[in-house]
Image: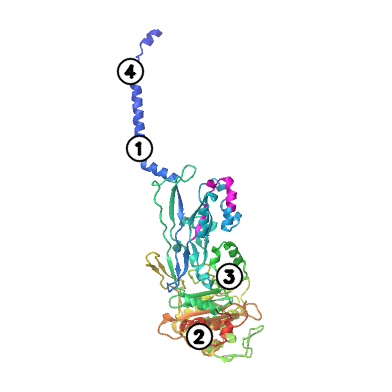
Amino acid sequence: MAEEHGRGQPRVSLKQRFLALSAIFAGSMVILGIYLFSLQILRGREYKQQARTVSQRSTPITAQRGEIYDTNRDVPLVLNIDSFAINVIPAEVGRNNLAPLFAKLAQLLSVPVSEIESRVPEKTWNLFQEIEVKSGVPFDVVARIAENLEDFRGVTWNNKPIRNYPQSGSISHIIGYIGDINSEELQVLFNKGYQPRTSVGKSGIEKQYDDLLRGTDGTKFRVVDVKEKSTGAVGEEPEDIAPIPGRSLILTIDRRIQILCERALGDRVGSVVVLRPATGEVLAMVSYPSFDPNLFTTPEGSSQFAKLTLDPSSPFLNRAIQSDYPPASTFKIVMTTAELDTQPLFPATKIVNCKGKFDAGDRFLDCHVHTGHGPLDLFGGLAQSCNVYFWTLGKELGVDRIVHYARDFGLGSLTGIDIPNETSGTVPSQEWKEKNKHARWVGGDTLNISIGQGDMEVTPLQEADMVAMVVNEGIIYKPHLLKAVVDPTTGETIRTVEPEILHQSPVPREVFRGVQEAMRGVITEGTPKEAITTKAVEIAGKTGTGEMGFKDRWHSWFCAYGPYKTDRPEERLVVVVSVEAVNKWEWWAPYATNLIFQGIFANQTLEEAVGTLKPWYREAIGRME
């Protein structure tokens, strides 16, 4: 039966088997051919590009940072100097050779070995990637490396310009400085294309407009093998991408006026602001002491920076916008505006008889003239800066009205100037005192702020805006330092900064005209008439002597504008000088202002202004180069 069943099955011939195997083989070859066709023809470019991408490495080419000019656009305030960055490719050096190499580089670059070791940590020793160990290296150091390549295996270099600041001094607070990006900055700026070791603005204009100044880095390509070694192959990699230089910036600062103000202030701790009220342009901004940003590009840059940071005189502090002080009697400009705007409450013609003392209820307050000023109206009260008059006015107005007018002048608020870290100052109120001092407002607080003392604090730039509002009869333009953005290649102006209204007061224009008249009376009949002697321009202004906790020294203010009368508002300038109480008391602010107005409107240097004015100025100013 088994044989019968076996004979019943169809037999597969050898030929059939061969044909089946041939069909399978042919089918496989067709499939393989199609797959190879897809790999090489249809998707060949894609895979070839992927292979290129895997084997290519890119190195950034640092873009030239934009230059910065003053308003005259003739000589750069900041420019670039060619220098180099030194890099190490750890794996190319070899683990056993890294320590000797670090020692040689440290000696050549004048840096501690530990600094190089921190930049090339052990976790990177197997990488065939360039790691920057020092920037700001001059050409002669690079030449020495190039002449001794056998001793510096694995060391490369690339061009990395450094910033040079031909004019340091007080303008450094405006310009600022740059440095390598830190980890906190990188977290914020990484999505904007910033990379480790990128140079970034740290303060001033360099920081404020870093996105315009830094340009766009280029890229240099190279082909590597599986061990990240450069193969030296050419023709396969894409062409290098050239860097795009940063924009050039034109500032509102006038270099001549900046130097004049700096020298008029001298070596006194304080500041000077010169503002064009019709546009908000800042023509000068001086703060002393200052610093030299060129020190940070030297081999001792880190130690120099640390030394300045610990300096008790705070040279990095831009006192024009980052320090606030009691405005003292300059605040009487605000009080005068409030009185003229509320005439039925306290008429400007009302006479206050100053006998040298003011009854504050539980005690008597002394006027600065202990024998008294006698009978005074508003104009006499401001001219003589009589505390009794303004205590009387403040008591009538009340704290809420005083705070309202102070804030209307922009006090207690940021001006929005285009450099970082401005402070807002303080306008104290009943709510402010309860929140910040956990105490109730009392009558003595109202008397204090009536003469710009107590907890009220303003910056010199806010003082300049305060005067600008009087000059513009109710309008404050946003102060700014940037005037225009320029294409560095074509010289074409890309953007011009137009005046922007920061605040417009509801106070009638005629009220501000009355304040202007009162401020002019301060100069002709009041406290500073012996100090303001310039004939180059008519000035209106106000002095201020602030108590700063010293028994024999006070903070000296003078804020003024000129010309007092003009048919061309754009030629008017506001000048604010503040001299801190840490200096020897000499009431210098009005004298410095006198020199500044003389120099600006007579087109004179400081020496020429001194020669025109009283001869004792030379001794008061001190050394003059």
Is 99 included in the stretch rendered in magenta?
A: yes
**Which residue is more in the foreground, 559 or 604?**
604
**Disc 1 residue crowd, few under 14, some 14–19, many 20+, Cα 10 Å:** few
Q: Is residue 477 above or below residue 525?
A: above
Residue 406 visible, this angle: no
- The answer to whether marks 4 and 2 mark residues whose Cβ atoms lie closer than 8 Å is no
Q: What is the distance, in whole Å, between disc 3 and disc 1 at their CAs?
A: 69 Å
What's the amino acid at mark 2? Met
Disc ID at residue 341: none
Q: Which residue is mark 4?
A: 15
Nearest to the observer: residue 296 or residue 437: 296
- Amino acid type, label 1: Ser
- Is the Cβ of the residue at disc 1 closer than 8 Å to that at disc 4? no
Tell me if label 4 and label 3 are in contact, CB under 8 Å. Answer: no
* For marks 4 and 3 on the same chain, the one whose residue lies earlier in the sequence: 4
The local crowd at label 3, few if under 14, some if 14 to 19, many if 20 or more residues have their Cα within 10 Å, is: many
Task: Give the number of the mark in front: 4 or 2.
Answer: 4
Front: mark 4 or 3:
3
- For the record, the magenta segment spans 83-103
User: Counting other residues with Cα less than 10 Å from the Cα at mark 2, is it few (<14), some (14-19), or many (20 or more)?
Assistant: many
The residue depicted at 51 percent of the width and 53 percent of the height is 147
Q: CA distance from mark 4 to mark 2?
A: 121 Å
Closer to viewer: mark 1 or mark 2:
1
Location of the C terminus by quadrant is bottom right
Residue 315 numbered tag: 3
In the picture, the disc for residue 519 is 2
Q: Earlier in the sequence, mark 4 or mark 2?
A: 4
Q: Which is the main secondary structure of the residues drawn in magenta?
A: helix
Disc number for residue 38: 1
- CA–CA distance in space, label 1 to label 2: 88 Å
